Image (cartoon, rainbow, N blue to C red):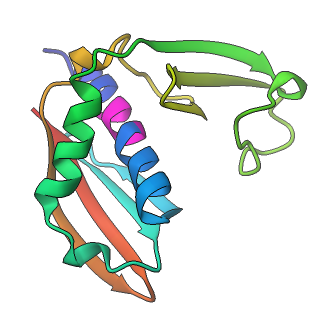
Amino acid sequence: MTNTDQTSRLNTAEHIFFRILLDEYQAKPKGLNNNGDSISLRVASPLELNKIALTEYESKVQNIINQNIEVKKYELAREEIKDVDISLVPEHIKKLRIVDIVDFDKQACRDQHVDNTSEIGKFQILKIKSKGGNTYNFNITIS
């Protein structure tokens, strides 16, 4: 497996995990760092995310992965985008690449992704750490 394949799988898994955190755990993005073989995802939430069993998160993500969902990638002009939050994308960027995990998640993203969630493999949370102030750092990977 190439590094590009690993990166595409990990990036797509991160989209799924983040969507679950956003929808089910009231999380808001604070930062993301791709470490090559893992991603550190920092979020804020009023819930005590570090008190929830890692297996709860992992099983929710794995359930989506196992649904074999198509992942579409396409470019749109900024003014054509209606259903994706692009507020953090600098105004000077006029064309954006959209990653659409069909009927699950749609985000602007410049990174590489798989064509189908079945390509991701096994999702794993290596650790979660409270950073104080309702902020949590998740270190995730895939195998």
Q: Residue at x 41, y 12 (%)?
A: 70
Q: Nearer the viewer, residue 2 or 128?
A: 128
Q: Nearer the viewer, residue 81 or 112?
A: 81
Coordinates of residue 20 in the picture (x, y in percent): 40, 48
Region in magenta: 10-15
* Quarter of image, res 6: top left
The N terminus, quarter of image:
top left
What secondary structure characterizes most of the magenta part?
A: helix
Q: Give the left or right position of residue 138, taking residue 58 as reference.
A: right
Q: Nearer the viewer, residue 64 or 78?
A: 64
The C terminus, quarter of image:
top left
In the rendered view, would you say 109 is above or below 102? below
Coordinates of residue 106 in the picture (x, y in percent): 57, 30
In the rendered view, would you say 3 is above or below 90? above
Q: Residue at x 11, y 55 (%)?
A: 55
Q: Residue at x 18, y 56 (%)?
A: 56
Examine the structure image and report whether residue 75 is included in the region drawn in magenta.
Answer: no
Q: Farthest bottom residue?
A: 133
